[in-house]
Image: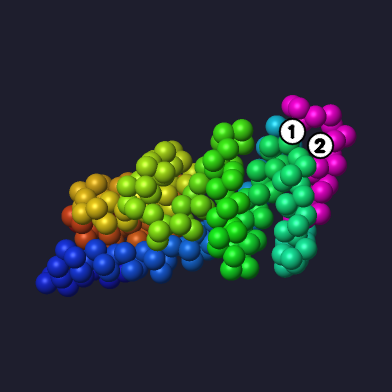
Amino acid sequence: MALPPSGTTDDGFLREVDEEYRRDRLLSIWRDYGRWIIGGVIAALAALALYLYLGHRASSAAGTQGEQFDAALRLAEENQPDKAIPEFDKIARQSGKGYAGLALITEGNLLLQKGDTKGATAKFAEVAGDASYPQPYRDLALLRQTSNEYDTLKPEQVIERLKGLAISTSPWFGTAGEMVAASYLKQGKRAEAGKLYGQIAQGGENVPESIRQRAVTLAGVLGVDAIDQSTGNTTR
């Protein structure tokens, strides 16, 4: 997003940022995280789910659940969501919390691809609101839920929800931080927004490139020096 002209009012700037953010938010999340969620991270989370499940069930039962999940995942990867969604739902209702949480999140992603935002949000909310699910699943589900509901939430609600994820040590720092910073701007808290954008710009490999570049620009507009570590550029 280009820097606004010198005569731009604060209100006009805030509207520009908000409109730009609305346009980019879902596309950015899907571009930056979609393949990771559906692809590579699924394998890692499935391994974690298997570990958790093995702590409560016999190896043979865990193997069966793993096979069921893999079969459903293949349907999703083959672009057959109408067949994959019922299978993931079955796994979510019949498995331990590890596989169940992973199945619900994947089901939500597939519903979102189909345009069923309400249904997807319900799946994410189910995981995010249940303390019995593993924390990594709850964090991811909360991020996805909040992204879907962003336009209907008050800024303070977004900030409260995501404050634990909008920190530099969080794997979701880039996306959560953007939503929190945009909410600060809606509240007129330019200093807080600028500081957070500056932190995002310095997030290194923990923040996707597209998010870092936006953060560099917005931090500079808000009067905060920011260094994009991916390129070495400095905004003053």
Res 101 → quadrant: top right
Residue 134 percent coordinates (x, y): 61, 35
Residue at x-position 34% and y-position 53%: 154
Q: Quadrant of the N terminus?
A: bottom left
Closer to us: 110 or 63:
110
For label 1, the residue is 53
- Residue 72: in magenta span: yes
Dot 1: what SS? helix
Residue that protrudes farthest toward the top in the picture? 55
Residue at x-position 27% and y-position 57%: 186
Residue 162 percent coordinates (x, y): 41, 44
Alpha-carbon span between mark 2 and mark 1: 6 Å
Q: Is residue 152 left or right of residue 63?
A: left
Q: Main secondary structure of the magenta part?
A: helix
- Name the amino acid type tagged 1: Tyr
Mark closer to the chain start, 2 or 1 = 1
Q: Is residue 151 visible?
A: yes
Q: Is residue 30 above or below residue 40?
A: below
Q: Quadrant of the C terminus?
A: bottom left
Closer to us: 47 or 92:
92
Q: Is residue 126 left or right of residue 173?
A: right
For label 2, the residue is 62
- Name the amino acid type tagged 2: Ala
Residue 53 percent coordinates (x, y): 74, 33
Q: Is residue 225 visible?
A: no
Residue 227 percent coordinates (x, y): 30, 52
Residue that protrudes farthest toward the left in the picture? 7
Q: Which residues are magenta?
A: 54-73
Closer to us: 97 or 222:
97
Residue at x-position 76% and y-position 47%: 91
The residue carrying pointer 2 sits among few (fewer than 14), some (14 to 19) or many (20 or more) residues within 10 Å by Cα, namely many
Dot 2: what SS? helix
